[in-house]
Image: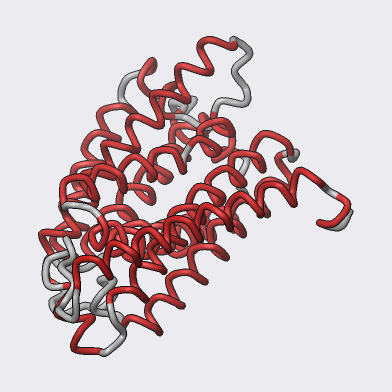
Amino acid sequence: MSAAGNPWRVSLWTSLWRWSHHVSRAISSRADSHSSGKRVRLHGAGLGNQLNRTGLGSRTFMTFAAVVGPLVAFAAAFQTLVFLVLPSRLRSIWAPMTIGTVGAMVTLGAALVFGFDRIGLRLADPGPAFLWAGGTLLAVASVGIVMLKSSPLRERLSDPRVAAWTNRGAVSHILFRIPLMTALIEEAFFRGVLHATLMAVYPPSVAMALGAVLFGLWHIGPAIDETESQTGGPARSLKVALTVVATTVAGAGLVWLRVETGSIWAPFAVHAALNMTMAIFARIASRTDWLAPARV
């Protein structure tokens, strides 16, 4: 069905466009009222100076910031809808495509217009990223080993979706899909583009909190998918809510790391190491034939 024949779709896009336009005009008006021919003050540390040196002007960046907000909301809502409506076979295709396409397009566009430094994509010193990745790997592996030794904990660690992977599929997920299509895209988008735009509009504490909350809401869809096998409505809803809370807290930690290190690469290293190591141990826990005692 075309957009013209779908009132819901037309209404959604019209509302998003009007909201973006309204916020953009409000931000531009605020900038005009405070600038008076002088440099506009932005909340992001050093961002105002960088924008003025490039000649792009604060209005351009703030207009972009006004567009990113509804885009994140729409992408999160669409991803959640994908997980709710589509069967698992189609879902496994469309959910990564949603994340990858939206995140890559916005990140690449922002990098080309505003520069890689401004959104944290330039890697000046790889040392912190390697240290954080190694520390995360050791910490998660230690917890995983302890959980494998306990039957109740091993059951909590196991995941039937991971167990269903073929060996080739497991290698593809762990070495490609998780670090590149999930961790890299999410960090470039949430800790890169979104963080920079929020810092341009809000005080640092508010920007960091909003970024963490949006990151948590982004995981509603995956949480629904993860709990699909559970029949109890309240228990499933509780687990989805706990997942959103946990990813919000994780998002706060990752955005703090982004601020401390000055780029997205340390958060990416932590994110990738965490998810990859968890996937490895979930596969080990799910493959009972690997853990069964040898028969004499």
Residue 82 in percent (x, y) is at 67, 43
Q: How many marks?
A: 0
- Vertically, is 184 above or below 225? below
Position of residue 220 measured from the top left corner of the image (x, y, whole percent): 50, 35
> For residue 206, what is the image quadrant?
top left
Q: Which of the 4 image quadrants contains residue 87?
A: top right
Q: Is residue 288 visible?
A: yes
**Picture coordinates of residue 151 (x, y %)?**
38, 17
- What residue is at 12 percent from the left and 66 percent from the top? 45
| 180 in relation to 156, above or below | below
Location of residue 155 by image quarter: top left
Of 274 and 215, which appears nearest the observer? 215
Direction from residue 212 to residue 34 in the image, left or right: left
Front-most of 25 and 206?
Answer: 25
The answer to whether residue 5 is left or right of residue 71 is right
Residue 114 sits above or below residue 235 on the image: below
The scheme the figure's colours follow is secondary structure
Q: Residue at x 43, y 71 (%)?
A: 107
Q: Nearer the viewer, residue 60 or 191?
A: 60
Q: Residue at x 19, y 73 (%)?
A: 35
Instruction: Give the residue displayed 25% in from the left and 71% down from the top.
Output: 120
Q: Of residues 232 and 241, which is closer to you in this image?
A: 241
Answer with left or right where residue 233 lies relative to residue 45: right
The answer to whether one can see residue 296 in this image is no
Horizontal and vertical percent position of residue 124: 15, 80
From the viewer's perspective, is 35 left or right of 184?
left
